[in-house]
Image (spheres, rainbow, N blue to C red):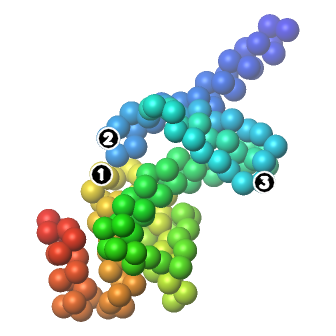
Amino acid sequence: MLKLFRKRGKIEKDLNRTVKIFGETISVRVIYKKLKNPELDLVGNIINVYLPNKYKRSGNIEIVKARVEIEKVMEETRIMLKGLAPENYEIRKLSNKLSKLTLERVIIINPEIVKYNKQVLKYVILHEFCHLKYKTHSKGFYKMMQKYMPEY
């Protein structure tokens, strides 16, 4: 019984963490349940992450943590640009980039971006949204960047 109690404490310690995301300390509580897809809820400064049981050994927790802030900035950017939006977006590891826009107009964001300042996330997402309108780094692209982020 004592052995089981010690293991339970270690498991709870591993699942319930405090993390820094863009300079803010946020408590993250991971709960594994019988689900099809991950779910999140935010209560005060605590993010409850509900993961399907199959994720227990997959190592995808960093992607789930990053999703909260990335989704927030994606929505803020869409509203700021009056509805200009990608077909979809994904959060997945990229080998040497923080983001990219595919030919199918899907924005891919590297979850490693949460290691940087929140302004970097805002810049990267705006950069990809501008590519929805301007495929290359043309004058129009830079004007659009400057209009929405003068300090870029």
Q: Which mark is residue 117?
A: 1
Q: Quadrant of residue 7?
A: top right
Is residue 59 among what the camera can see? no
**Marks 2 and 1 close (CB-CB < 8 Å):** yes
Q: CA distance from mark 1 to mark 3?
A: 32 Å
**Residue 56 image point, x, y percent:** 74, 43
Q: Is residue 75 left or right of residue 2?
A: left
Indicate the secondary structure of the residue bearing disc 3: loop
Quadrant including the C terminus: bottom left
What kind of residue is marked 2? Answer: Gly
* Residue under the point 63% across and 36% down: 30
User: 10 Å neighbourhood of mark 3: few (<14), some, or many (≥20)?
Assistant: few
Q: CA distance from mark 2 to mark 1?
A: 7 Å
**Residue 55 image point, x, y percent:** 73, 48
Which mark lies nearer to you, 2 or 3? Answer: 3
Quadrant including the N terminus: top right
* Residue under the point 22% across and 90% down: 140
